[in-house]
Amino acid sequence: MPTFKKVNKKDLEILQNFGYYFDDVKTQYEITRMKGECTLILFNSNKLLIQGKDNKVKELVTLLKNEKVGEYVEPINFVKEEGVVIGTDEAMKGDTFGGLIVAGVKADDKTRENLLLIGVGDSKKIKDEDIQGMAKRIKEIVCHHIISLSANQYNILIEELGNVTKLLNRMHQQCIDKLDFHDLAVVDKYPGCNVGKAMTKAESKYIEVAAASILARDETLKQFRKMSKELKFTVPKGSTTVKEEVMKIPKDKLKKYVKLHFKNVQQLFPIYRH
């Protein structure tokens, strides 16, 4: 289903000249609907979704592009599965600050359609300020499970298990088990993954993994906000430009905020080298 972003209700008034009319909304997430040869749904995120017969949808997309209504979003052609599918994805694996998150989503034919309707796509293309709202809508639509480890919990488990691969395998499996696995479980592939059906760039192939990715990113943002509030400075993401911020943390509190086995942390604090 084609989508446009950055669309306002006023932008759609021009379609009244082409036989379209405004209709009542059906969910709390919608700003408005329009009907004509196609159905248009404008969501609170200012994302516009178009439904209808292929030839009519193509004509409308061309019209909206010509009229410069919003910005066209290239569609993701998700795999068309039948029945129940579980998708899992992780976040924060490469961040010096914080712990590790794995999220899982379970969907059937109906809930997959609903995920498409609210515009679930690649989380990397969604702005931080839009993630929370999208995550909330996903949680209301599908059965889901999220494991969010703090840095302290992460450090304890790494000490116990020996490496992050074993921890990831455990967390992904726990998500799948919690969602009552019966059929297909797709995992966004990482080195050493031995859980479910591991696929590279699974978030661009399975909408369940795309939805899980959004939930994981939402939890990531929550962790960073919490750490920033506690430490009284903006905690940086990633691992390339974090030295200054890591050095601000008292040594006795390091394990609460950073991954102790990361090389950049061990270079700054040799006491944590093994």
Image (cartoon, rainbow, N blue to C red):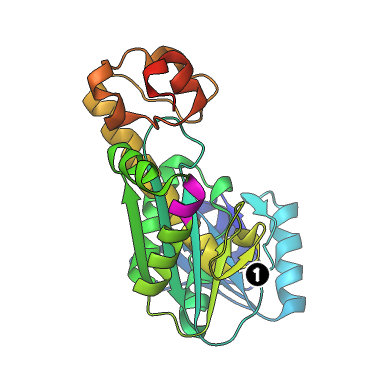
Residue occupying image coordinates x 46% and y 85%: 182
SS category of the residue bearing label 1: loop
Compared with 126, 81 (above or below) is below
Q: Nearer the viewer, residue 100 or 38?
A: 100
Do we see residue 101 in this rendering?
yes
Q: Main secondary structure of the magenta part?
A: helix
In percent of width and height, residue 81 lies at 61, 82
Does the segment drawn in magenta span residue 167? yes
Residue occupying image coordinates x 35% and y 59%: 146
Do we see residue 6 in this rendering?
no
Compared with 16, 110 (above or below) is below
Image quarter of the N terminus:
bottom right
The residue tagged 1 is 78
In percent of width and height, residue 262 lies at 47, 29
Q: On the rendered structure, is 127 left or right of 36? A: left
Compared with 180, 12 (above or below) is above
In percent of width and height, residue 172 lies at 45, 62
Q: Nearer the viewer, residue 179 or 41?
A: 179
In percent of width and height, residue 150 lies at 30, 42
Q: Nearer the viewer, residue 156 or 190?
A: 156
Image quarter of the C terminus:
top left
Q: Give the quarter of the image for residue 215.
A: bottom left
Q: Give the quarter of the image for residue 189.
A: bottom right
The residue segment tinted magenta is 164-168
Q: Amino acid at mark 1?
A: Phe
